[in-house]
Image (cartoon, helix red, strand yellow):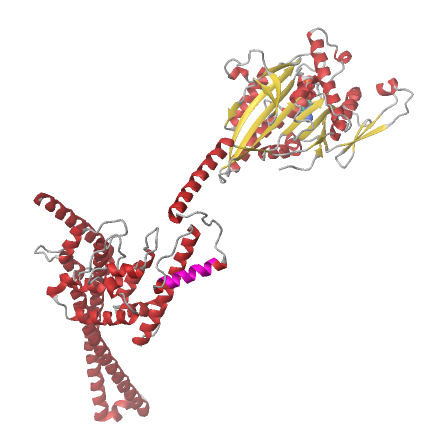
Amino acid sequence: MKSPSKGVEVFVRIRPTAYFAQDLIECLPDGKTLNLHQRKDSRIHLEFSKVPPVSLSFGLEGVLHNVSQEEVYARVCRPVVMGALDGYNGTVMCFGQTGAGKTYTMTGSMESYRQRGIVPRALQEVFQEVEKRTEHAFSVHLSYLEIYNETLVDLLSSLHSPQPFPRGLVVMEEPGRGVFIRGLSLSPVHSVEEALSLLFEGEMNRIIGSHALNRKSSRSHAILTVHIESRSRTLSDAKYFTSKLNLVDLAGSERLGKTGSEGQMLKEATYINKSLSFLEQTILALTDCHRDHVPFRQTKLTHALKDSLGGNCNTVLVANIYGEAAQIEETLSTLRFASRMRCVQTSPAANEHIDHALEIQKLQKEVEMLKEELSICNTLVKQPNPMYEPLSEAQQAEVQSQVQRYLEGSLKEITIKSIRQVHAVFAQFKQALQEQEEKVKAQLCQTYNLVKKGGSADTAAYKGLDTKEADSLATSQQPSSTKAKPTKVRDKQSQNRRQPEGSPLLRKGSESSAVQMSEKKTQESQEPDMDSQDTQEPQLTTPSQLPPSKAEVFEDFKIGRGRKINLILRENKAVLMERRSLLQQLTGDVNAIKREIDSTTASLQQLEEMGGGQGQYLAVAGDTDASLLVQLRELKAKYRQRYEVLRDVRAEFNYCQHLVDQSRVRLLSEFEVWYKQCFPSPGEEPDMRVYRMYTQETDSPQPSDQLQHELLTESSSSESFYNARYRTLKRRTSRVASSTQKKTQ
Ligand SMILES: Nc1ncnc2c1ncn2[C@@H]1O[C@H](COP(=O)(O)OP(=O)(O)OP(=O)(O)O)[C@@H](O)[C@H]1O
């Protein structure tokens, strides 16, 4: 991610003073231009007396005159902080004469929160953003470097064990890493509080000199760096971003003569001036496109800031000036430096990295997966040159024809060539099955004159079952055709040949024979042959056989193991039918009486209208009318009596309906259990013990017998309760059976 190159952004901040030289310094209303007028009596004029008075104009990103600390931060630093969180290096530095307000701008007041400077605000914003950007995991470290008299000092060393590098800190450069200070401590920080306490610690350690101009003037350059690393929490890629946010408070530029420094102070001032002058030379070299060498290494300051000056960094300079007439020479020099700085171009670029360890891990995983896939392919294919490309249309058509021929029996085996071809074969099977189903349904609907009403009527017709039972079976049905062996799709005919006599699979002939069979079964179930039930049980499957469909063996179940519950269901249904016809009859009676009541009432009303009112009515009505009244009374009494009977019968009917539902659920759930035990999934052995238990009649009461009474007397909402209880009883019964078997062995 690379942004277009741009110049270093430069702001001028004017230190407030009661003696602001407004005739010399003019801030234009655009807020971006500052004009400096040279006066006849100024020192500048005296020194260059032959030069006619001139006005110099400086274009900037902004003139910060009488603005709050908050606004300074928002305009100068916030965009750089945001960039740093996105992976762009950023540098904000203050330059200017001693006492012009550099430290005030960078650090601000240590006592007043409102007057805190750029650094504490930047730290605060970093952690606020870290909390907001939840889709990224950030790690933040701080380092605090001081350059004093060309010596590098770790301002946070007091918090760490002695330095591992006895020769002190060294500015280093490494390809891919850029410039860094070897031996400088990196303190991890997890909150704004931790970060601020490190800042305060560093500030305490910073050497404060005193000299004639400013008792608190800092005599060193200070670089606080926030090192940020961010990794995506949502993407599993090995990409991550790093950035450095440098907050630089440069030592004050000053004229030696003016400060009156001597001794140690003089030495300090010399170093400071030297480094600032090299900084200026470096900037000049950077702005000169014909120079191939930029003397970054001349001083520790320029070397340490190499990345920030003309690198891939978002760089902002705040030029602090002291707006009094006496300081006009320093102001001019600061503004000249500022305008040169504006010409320096940087090419901000996000520092994107690849976590090689993670990348290797990912690739290793991928290789493992591909190896597995390849081994499956090799097992399946057993031939050279397997196909890896998606099937072409011609190949798809070939697969379709192969499946057709295989189903018809003219093709013995489909040769497996690739995973994609296997998928295509299965898809063709699925399609063929769906087509067959549709065909059978249509045929059955025609045979039984059934109207197609969604799935229910069709499913019922499918095997001649009760609609609800068939629906339930249909939903739980597993397409037996999909249970093919994984490596070879075997010939269907040869499989049928292996089925034992009497296997339900053998009944899976043509569609018409299926219909005949279901009709035959229906007859059989109406007259169950108790003695032959064992022979009616389906054959157990072996792992090489396909299990019969549930619909096929359901009839067997109903006359075999599920005979009792099926009989109960039938009895309940019979009672329900009887109640239904009684209900219909009673409803007809009640409606007829109601109609009679209505007509009698109408006749009486007619007579009343003819008599012109209640009083006359009695006089005119005579015997006929009196008999109508009696008739009406009798009809009402009869209506009440019949209605009560109707209400009772309706209640009985509803109750019977519950019983039928319950016994149906029982029948189906017992069937499901029985089916699972008798026809286990491929790879599982059929449970012979359970199979025997279900096929042999025992003297001990079956769970079904125990539950029967409860099922018949409870409401249908208790269904799940009973299902659970039934399963528990079943498990217990099978456990008891197995322990008894062990004891007898
Ligand atoms: N914008 C401002 N508003 C209020 N006070 C200010 C402002 N700028 C500077 N000052 C005050 O001016 C004095 C000198 O400021 P400061 O120490 O920040 O200067 P400096 O440029 O860092 O000096 P040095 O180079 O010697 O470190 C301080 O007392 C500071 O509070």
What x and y, as percent, mark residue 298?
Answer: 70, 17
Q: Residue at x 12, y 67 (%)?
A: 529
What x and y, as percent, mark residue 186?
Answer: 54, 22
**Residue 224 part of the magenta segment:** no
Question: In this view of the protein, which residue sits in the foreground, 283 or 678?
Answer: 678
Query: Could you tell me if residue 186 is visible in this image?
Result: yes
Q: Is residue 676 above or below residue 232?
A: below
Q: Residue 535 vs residue 292: left or right?
A: left
Magenta-highlighted residues: 395-406
| Image quadrant where one finds the C terminus | top left
Q: Residue at x 87, y 17 (%)?
A: 47
Q: Residue 296 vs residue 426: left or right?
A: right
What x and y, as percent, mark residue 537?
Answer: 17, 61
| Image quadrant where one finds the N terminus | top right
Number of dots carrying numbers: 0
Query: Could you tell me if residue 17 is visible in this image?
Result: no
What x and y, as percent, mark residue 425?
Answer: 40, 57
Of all residues, the one furthest to the front in this rendering is 384
Q: In this view, does 656 lie above or below 46?
A: below
Quadrant of res 101? top right
